[in-house]
Image (spheres, rainbow, N blue to C red):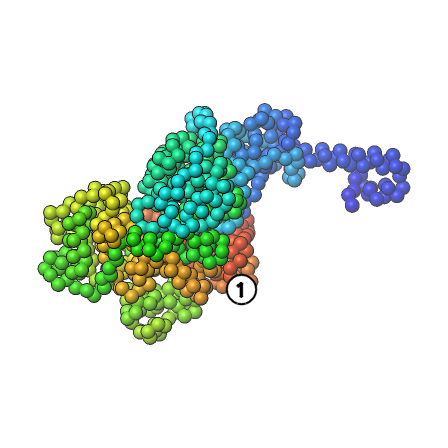
Amino acid sequence: MSRENGRSEVGVEASGTGEQLALIREAVREKKADRAKPRTWRGAELAAELPVARVLVDKGLVHLDRYFDYAVPAAMDAEAQPGVRVRVRFGAGEKGGRREGGKLVSGFIVERVAESEYRGVLAPLAQVLSPERVLSPELLGLCRAVADRYAGTLADVVQLAVPPRRARAEAKPSPPLLAPNPPPEVGSWARYGAGAGFLSALTRGDAPRAVWTALPGATWPQELARAAAAALAGGRGALVVVPDGRAAARVDEALGELIGEDRHVLLTADAGPEERYRRWLAVSRGSVRAVIGTRAAMFAPVADLGLVALWDDGDSSHSDPHAPQPHAREVLIQRSVNERAGFLLGGLSCTVEAAQLVETGWARPLTAEREQVRAAAPLVRTIGEGDEARDAAARAARLPSMAWQVVRDGLTRGPVLVQVPRRGYAPRLACERCRTPARCRACAGPLEAQEAGALACAWCGRAEPDWHCAECGGARLRAQIVGARRTAEELGRAFPAVPVRTSGRDHVLTTVPGAPALVVSTPGAEPVAEGGGYAAALLLDGWALLGRPDLRAGEEALRRWLGAAALVRGQAAGGTVAVIAEPTLRPVQALVRWDPVGHAVRELAERAELGFPPVSRMASVAGRGEDVAELLRTAELPPGAEVLGPVPLPVPDAGRPRRPGDPPPGEEWERALVRVRPGQGAALAAALKAARAARLVKREGEAVRVRIDPPDLG
């Protein structure tokens, strides 16, 4: 019941005439309408229609994760459309009926409306930076979904999705959209049982979903290109995301050869800011419907998307280091659902997340028959860490005799790849007898050595004074890499007549000649050998990968090994791979059988039994001890949520550059893990986000960092 001039409408209706009642109601409506009109600074003339702009302000603070209303001056009416960049005064105060002060900040108009719910004085838009509509409704919806999933802010996700403006690139028109290309031939997809059907479904405009385990060899860029070309042939768009610029260049070249020039763009950092923005604009304007790129391309605004494809989702570069740290796999899954596009998750290996997509029925497996695998894969030989060199030359190179023989024989037929783990790998604790990882009896987290040799869980902090192996009953632990540790210099001295090339962090090679040579590479930096591949490969120091303090240590070791071994010639051509690691370990056996899917399925079953991700959902909460405790106390966590910890975070080495998530210099931080059942992930993210926002509003304590589904659990 509303009141105007001290009288209620009910009272008027009871005592007044119908004409009086109509006049009073009209006056009430006029007053409400007048009150709803935005009042602006100094009575500036407003846009005649939809005079209120709702703006997403570029402030990544969780308690400001909402839209703010601004008045649209008549002079900006034509340009101030949804999706454009603007400048507004943020934080202005009201004084004497006016808005005063405020700092100029950037933002995006998300919509224009007729009325504002804010009853104070609306500040006008300060400037329309560009009439280019870069934030489409579809892209805005995707960013909102990603922000909600990762307990982040919309402004932070939009900053990842929309590249910075370059005026010169915007001033240039984009070329017209070309007609669709003809459907591609099946090509090497014929080696996969459902490969031809998958391409046909994309060409028809269907939305098939597949987890693809690629055969070893150098053909996967062409196969990704054919999948993209099939979607384009059906009149829809395609988006392919790969881990690095080298992989992107290979797929880019393959797609260019398949469909011709000017039908797709390459989005990588190598292009430079202006050229990259020019290409992004071509996609946003609908001039190009195919994109190949690295992580940031997962948000590329491809029109009428028909296929999203991700290569090697286990690579850490697919996880964005900037808040809220989304993973490309999850973003592309969201796009596939939102835009009803086909989905292709491919790799030489298989992650547990990929195995879960198949197990739940969300995607179908796309694999080759075992005969095809055996024909394409090299022969894999295992060398135990205790094996010793029996001849003088092998001892000089600090290689077991079998490894020495593999290298020597391979050099007679072509180049030999030597994979050496990066420095800085810290092995986790495991049973000395059977190599089973040492885990906490309470939460199954990994055990680590504390001061004075005491054991404690890295997740919940529970002490383990009397640890015994659950598999064999052993009571002794190991943390060192047992076996020969080799360097490129030692191999060079052992083979003085053979050229030695290195590929690593500072200098990564793309290709090497097919002539005999030793190519020493760190994992992920292996170059492609011309002339059909390497004659042999040697995978050194397996425990440096298998012993990492990480939940994914076995999966990651197998992924690294498969990536290197896939560059070696098949068995028919004499290709051989030697891996120095304990032969009985599950990842080593999966490499010997070339069975990444079987390994992922077993890992998934084990994680389900222990309550590990991805079967469960987890959040990491890090900060000062008192701040972490207070946030968890006030957060309305889902029923059954389990809090593990907190435990102290290790202080980064003084000489190491700071990484995202590291504590500020001089501060001691703690980390707690929150574990919930499947289906409670959204509630967990919402609860932690709300608790963070409440703390910021009340200005209680220091900021706490929250990360949903951290990929680097110890």
Residue 53 occupies which quadrant of the picture? Answer: top right
**Residue at x 32%, y 57% (from the top left corner):** 594
Q: Position of residue 549 (x, y in %)?
A: 34, 60
Q: Position of residue 163 (x, y in %)?
A: 44, 36
Callout 1: SS: loop
Left or right: 547 in relation to 237: left
Q: Which residue is mark 1?
A: 640
**Foreground: 619 or 680?**
680
Q: Quadrant of the C terminus?
A: bottom left
**Residue at x 55%, y 55% (from the top left corner):** 683
**Foreground: 670 or 420?**
420
Amino acid of disc 1: Gly
Counting every numbered tag in the picture gives 1
Q: Position of residue 350 (x, y in %)?
A: 38, 54
**Residue at x 60%, y 30% (from the top left corner):** 72
Q: Is residue 321 above or below residue 107?
A: below
Q: Quadrant of the N terminus?
A: top right
Q: Position of residue 66 (x, y in %)?
A: 56, 43
Left or right: 489 in relation to 186: left
Q: Is residue 568 above or below residue 122?
A: below
**Residue at x 25%, y 56% (from the top left corner):** 379
